[in-house]
Image (cartoon, rainbow, N blue to C red):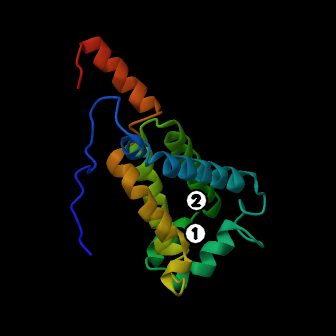
Amino acid sequence: MTHRMRADTHTSHSGSGGDWRDTAVRYALLPLRVFLGVTFIYAGLDKITDSAFMKDAGSGSVGDMMRAVRDSSAIPALVDLSLKSPVGFGYAIALGELAVGIGTLLGLLARLAALGGALISLSLWLTVSWASDPYYYGNDLAYLMAWIPLVLAGAPLLSVDAALRSRRRQRTGSYR
């Protein structure tokens, strides 16, 4: 059996043309952006509207959750910090998730939003899901890894950032 090298290898086109592979490459991060944006908006709203979660103590409260993970977390001092004001911490996480989700979904300050999502996921991994065994049962590590491509690439298409960048280019006459 003979194998040949393909002559029709994929090359990136900087113009708006190109084949389906070029289109797929341009839109590759969009499903990830939509998923993370919707998920973080939902998580933030779920926390804010859950009266049991936003309490110092009681079943399902942020306070009891943090006390339960304190001794098994990678950074107990971070959990201790949250326990100084569990309700305040709960609102900070919920509002942070909302801001990250909205920024990611709209593509507004997308890299900053993705960095915020990565930091939230990192802090939750090091505290709440650190003791997950095996490690891949804890979803916060997977979310952390999912944020990294968006931190690196931002939201180059279908985003407020892209629209603002396009307007700046039109004003300055730049075609880059």
For disc 2, the neighbor class at 10 Å (few under 14, some 14 to 19, many from 20) is some
Q: Nearer the viewer, residue 9 or 55?
A: 9
Name the residue at the bottom extreme. Answer: 133
Give the quadrant of the N terminus. Answer: bottom left
Q: Is residue 155 left or right of residue 95?
A: left
Q: Earlier in the sequence, mark 2 or mark 1?
A: 1
Check disc 1 and give the amino acid type. Answer: Leu
Q: Which mark is residue 171?
A: none
| Mark count | 2
Q: Nearer the viewer, residue 122 or 11?
A: 11
Tag 2 residue = 89
Separation (CA) of disc 2 from disc 1: 8 Å
Q: Quadrant of residue 57?
A: bottom right
Q: Is residue 10 left or right of residue 68?
A: left
Above or below residue 140? Residue 71 is below
Q: Is residue 158 left or right of residue 69?
A: left
Above or below residue 8? Residue 85 is below
Tag 1 residue = 83
The residue that appears at 36% across and 42% down in the rendered structure is: 22
The residue that appears at 39% across and 44% down in the rendered structure is: 112
Helix, strand or loop at disc 1? helix
Helix, strand or loop at disc 2? helix
CB under 8 Å between discs 2 and 1:
yes
Residue 111 x %, y %: 38, 44
Check disc 2 and give the amino acid type. Answer: Phe
Residue 171 x %, y %: 30, 12
